[in-house]
Amino acid sequence: MKGVMLMLRNKNYESLKLPCLIGAIVLLVASIIGITVVYQKRIALVREVTRSEMRLKTSKTKYHEKAKEVTQEAQKEAATSKNPAINTVAKQIYYSNQITKTANKFFNIYYTWSDYDNYMKRAKKASKIITNNLAKNKEIFDDGKDTTGGNIIQNEQLHSEFESAKAYLSQGHGSTARALVKVTNSAWYSDGKANAGDSTHYYDLVYNLNTNKISNLKLVFTESSDGND
């Protein structure tokens, strides 16, 4: 009798085990399907966001290109205008843009160095945008030494990094234009860039409109801030 009862219990267990197993499988499959659906939705959302960003980027690019095209066309028409006032303004804008563009190229070279060798090669690197006379100007391109002959750049491991330049046209006539250029850079010693100090320099710049070169440059004054402030 006990054997029969044990057999019946085993049968009942087996009969209960199968539905439980099936139920577990169903729950597992449902969970996998649910996770897959959520994952697919997230992928679709990411793809849509990516497409939207690309469309936005494309739209911005097209807008800037069109704006640049319209601006250039307007400046071209203004430069050839028979109205003296319009013609003058157009030329001033053109001169200012040209000087700012060249000033950024020049001062990026002038205020960027990591050692004495780079410091001394600045005039050569800028040779395409400055005149020979300016390249030989020792007030602009000094030897990096103090009054005692000490090598400041090398001995104090002085580094510099250009930040920005903006030209403010003061006058333009014939083949030359003159501007006040605001230049910013950061500099640091061997203690690292984290302790860099920022400086703002103002230069009187003369630009040759025929050669597209800087023909004269003079430092007006400099404002500095301590990197530890």
Image: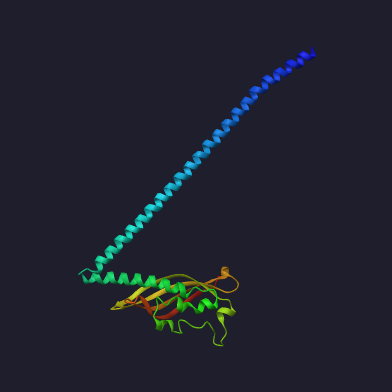
- Residue 212 appears left or right of 113: left
Above or below, 123 against 83 in this view is below
Q: Position of residue 98 (x, y in %)?
A: 35, 71
Q: Which colour scheme is used?
A: rainbow
Residue found farthest to the left: 82
Viewport quadrant of the C terminus: bottom right
Q: Where is residue 168 in the image (x, y as percent from the top left)?
A: 36, 73
Question: Can I make out residue 228 in this image?
Answer: no
Viewport quadrant of the N terminus: top right
Q: Position of residue 51 (x, y in %)?
A: 43, 47
Taking the spot 79% from the left edge, 14% from the top edge, the residue there is 2
Question: Can I make out residue 32 in this image?
Answer: yes
Above or below, 43 against 74 in this view is above
Give the camera-side residue of 72 and 93: 72
Residue found farthest to the bottom: 148
Q: Position of residue 19 (x, y in %)?
A: 64, 22
Taking the spot 25% from the left edge, 67% from the top edge, the residue there is 78
